[in-house]
Amino acid sequence: MKQDIILAGVGGQGILSIAYVIDNAALADGLAFKQAEVHGMAQRGGAVQSHMRLSDGTIWSDLIPKGEADMILSVEPLEALRYLDHLKPDGIVISSAAPYKNIPDYPDLDKVLEAIRKAPRSVVIDSEKLAKAAGTVKAQNIVLLGAASSFLILKERSLLGTIDTLFRGRGPAVLEANLKAFDLGKKVALGS
Amino acid sequence: MPRQILLGDEAVALGAVHAGLSAAYSYPGTPASEILEFLVRLAAETKAFPAVWSVNEKVAYEEALGASFAGKRALVSFKHVGLNVAADPFMNSAITGANGGFLVVSADDPGMHSSQNEQDSRYYVHFAQIFGYEPSDHQEAYDMAREAFDLSERLGLPVLMRLVTRLSHSRSAVETRDPRPQNELKKGAGKDWILLPVNARRRFGQLLDRQAEMIRLSDESRFNVLDLNDKDRSFGVIASGIAYNYFREAVAAEAAPPSFLKISTYPLPEGLIRKLVGHVDTVLVLEDGYPFVERQIKGLFGVPGKTVLGKTTGAVPASGELTPDIVRRALGREPLPSLPASGLPLAGRPPQLCVGCPHADTFKALNKALEGIAGSNVFSDIGCYTLGALPPYNAIHTCVCMGASVGMARGASDVGLHPAVSVIGDSTFAHSGITPLLGAAEANTDMTVIILDNATTAMTGGQPTHGSGERLLRLIEALGVAKEHIRTIEPLPKNHDKNVQVLKEEIGHHGLSVVVAVRECVQEQRKKRS
């Protein structure tokens, strides 16, 4: 049993929080994992990505080879497209539909979404709307994690437990919003 | 055994703590910063040892060396180019030797994710003729850090661990073991540490005498693994550090993978290499960084009757970070089937200054003040403000190494360039901008130094800075800069015209001026609010 996921987004969008939840859930489930991430210069509003590998056996490379990724999970649609050539032919793209436009030459959004939907399996969700409905627009990353949860080899209980650990210290309202964000993302993805 | 989630950097740090660490020093630099960050957090909880952000890497090295001389176990960490700054004490500490275990961690950045070059710290291991480790994964990073302190004390020498970005910034679970207590204070062999020629010659001789022992230790190290395929003697692989992972990844599904030698310690395990090379006709050498192993194996004349492939032969690209895909190709394995790229032209998303960043306002004012002046006049430095080189600012014309802007502006001024402007952050100024300014003040060099005081070391995540605010202003004055030419501005949009005026006046002054742009980093402000 193994699963390779590319997490993508823009610096500051909470990619590393998604990774934190998955890492800890993997530890709780007794799986091996390696998770390569980007620090330093790129975090200043640049494209960031994290290679997340889960397995019940040995994981060698910290990076996912091209053609090995089972899933691209992206908090931003343009960023989802950057790593398509890492995806297995039957891999799934789970992406936010909400663009993060901090560059002057952002491509036509309809074309970006169309390109994502060309993947054999894709889930595109309005994470901005769902996060707001959950109580904070900051929870878009957790909406996406919820959307991905039904496709992950991790126990939902482990994911929720880590979300609890991550947000409990920030007050009950923040925790509640993130748990709700997870749930909304999950439901919308299953219905799509 | 407990399992703990750690970055590669943190695995080294925790290994050191469990080895009885008594003191740690560093200067921030990607990808090494998280080593000391972890230790600072741990030290705040346990109060068990000092974990110190030093003024620069040379100072950090000397502080750690002093702790080792006092008999305690000490760690110093920095990015690869930080070892250049610390190269003087580093090279000489191989001659003095260490007393308490002394681990030097240098994190390389193949592919230059956040660096000016991709120099390979293994050459420093070779240069100083000491023992070095190169972990391939998190567990090894932890285990090697523990072992390194024992070995350092056994050899009486500092030991270097080389990391690369990909391991430094990857997370995994590590099995930890019970900690060992710290050393007692212990006075050492004082004469060994006085590098007068008479002592240095003796000590260098002793260092050379230990080389055979170090090679034997490498040959016997459990971190080096030789696996010979008896059925196929045509082809084998030598892979060092994380390159080993990419090799194993590529052949994971194969029933009879090629013979291989994993190298994770230096000097080279010569006996193991002879066995592998003797066993096969063709050897592919895989390493993330320079062709360090490959060149030593081939020497000038190659290995008679054998083919050695690698970065020098084009089998592997000579520059850039190694990836599993590159290794797969070098091994002659077919690429895995994958989805094609989207075909859509994907706009790049380079890093940029944050919204509301004070540097942006300083650059806007500086560009205005220099309007109509042609040429490359603005010497700059290393930090977030290096992003001022990119559009829309295009405001700076150099970025070489920490503190270089001040000395370079002086050199340009000395030969007649006017205006000569230096732009440097407060942390970089403290690191190595003070000494060139001392010289320029004495000479009253015709140049303008702009110090961007945002009260933090921002690019690496907001570590403390040693000269900011009033302390910085007093320091500049004490260096001998005329008080009337030390000006401060507050880089805010509303002050733009005023700031342009100040910059114009000081750039127009034919002598030394220092303009300090004072406004806190917006990221740090945000952290304080949340």
Image (cartoon, coloured by chain):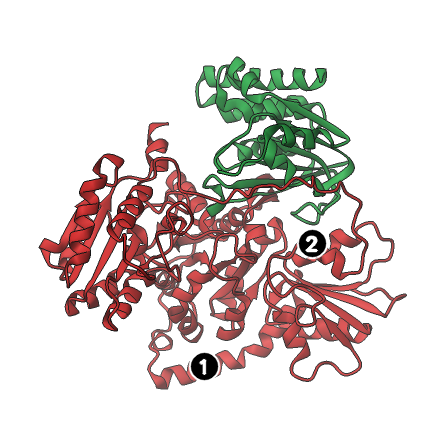
Chain colours: A green, B red
Identify the secondary structure beneath mark 1: helix
Q: Can you identify the residue that label 2 sits on?
A: B245
Identify the secondary structure beneath mark 2: helix
Sooner in the amino-acid sequence: mark 1 or mark 2: 1
In the rendered view, would you say B366 is above or below A148?
below
Residue at the image point whose x is 44% and y is 18% from the top: A171
Q: Residue B62: give its label.
A: none
Pick whichever, B386 or B528, lies toward us: B386
Image quarter for residue B211?
A: bottom right
* Spot occupied by residue B384 in the image (x, y as percentages of width and height): 38, 47
Quadrant where the N terminus of chain B sits is top right
* Spot occupied by residue A98 in the image (x, y as percentages of width and height): 56, 25
Pick whichever, A46 or B478, lies toward us: A46
Residue at the image point whose x is 20% and y is 57% from the top: B507
Q: Chain of mark 2?
A: B
* Spot occupied by residue B127 in the image (x, y as percentages of width and height): 50, 74
Name the residue at the right extreme: B231
In the rendered view, would you say B324 is above or below A96?
below
Residue at the image point whose x is 40% and y is 40% from the top: B46
Pick whichever, A125 or B478, lies toward us: A125
Q: Can you identify the residue that label 1 sits on?
A: B204
* Spot occupied by residue A89 in the image (x, y as percentages of width and height): 79, 38
Image quarter for residue A109?
A: top right
